[in-house]
Image (tube, helix red, strand yellow):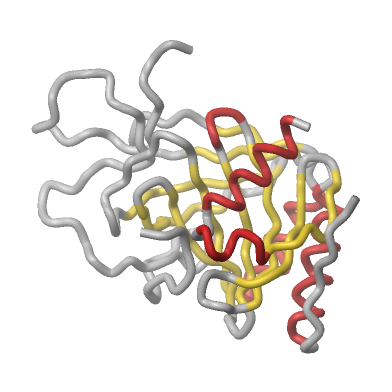
Amino acid sequence: MRKAFWILAGVLAMLPLQARAQLSLVSRTGVWEVFSGRSNNGTMVCVLSTGGPEGRYFGLKYFLGNQHVTTHLSKGGWNIPEGTQVPVEIRFGGETPWRYRGTGHRNFVEGRITADRLALFIREFRGAGRGQITFPQGSEGSWSLNLSGSSAAADAFSGCIRQLAQGAPQGAPQGAPRGPTQPFSPAPSQAPRAAPSQPFSPAPGPLPSTGGTYDGNRGGGDSGQAAEEGPPK
């Protein structure tokens, strides 16, 4: 029950109040859940996600009409300056890590997996027994991914995407005392105190304003289009 709570809480945190009732549970396998419904702007969406301690959230989201899948990494206590580029590595089992620069938005980091890379990403995701997410910069520690149930979850997620593409939306409900860590390093000008950890190191100059997302390439994707979907500002 606690795992289900964290997973659902993570999904709800990514949507505004008026959209929270628009997601329905499609499947639950292991620690993974798949949801289908509408985003805050009415776009149909499929969500594959899991949660963890300290409000950790890892989600893959397909918005109808896109040619990519959006990724979200979030954690309670993160405070990322808008548009900050955040290096991230995701590794499934003994496979080569996926390295990219996501884009920070307050308490979450967003990226994308392009259509030409999605099949490989899903194959590694479903074939491994464990995974790891690391943040090369900042003070955020590594996240351990429990991939129990990932194969069945990947099937449900793929099926949801197919249903959306065919115009038949899927989704029926089924039955330590210290400051929060952050994935980036605080700027030198900040007060010397135990601030929450962050997944990036602030640049010395003005922050970029592209709000871009990554392309999912293992060599490290560059920023792309501005994010269209995400948590409320």
Quadrant where the N terminus is found in the figure: top right
Judge left or right: residue 179 versus residue 134. Answer: left
Depicted 162 relative to depicted 149: above or below: below
Q: Residue at x 77, y 64 (%)?
A: 157
In x, y percent, where is residue 63? 61, 75
Residue toward you, 224 or 179? 179
Total of numbered circles in the picture?
0
Residue placed furthest toward the bottom: 167
Q: Residue furthest right?
A: 175
**Residue 43 occupies quadrant:** bottom right
Horizontal and vertical percent for residue 170?
A: 81, 73
Q: State the residue at coordinates (52%, 48%).
A: 73
Q: Residue at x 64, y 71 (%)?
A: 62
Above or below: residue 21 compared with residue 44: above
Query: x, y (%) of residue 152?
Result: 88, 54
Where, quadrant-wise, is the C terminus in this rendering? bottom left
Left or right, 195 with respect to 74, comes to: left
Q: Residue at position x 72%, y 30% from top?
A: 2
Instruction: Give above or below for 179 relative to 91.
Output: above
- Horizontal arrangement in the rendering, residue 64 relative to residue 54 (left or right): right
Q: Which is more toward the observer, 24 or 150?
A: 24
Residue 230 % position (x, y): 47, 63
The image quarter in which residue 131 lies: top right
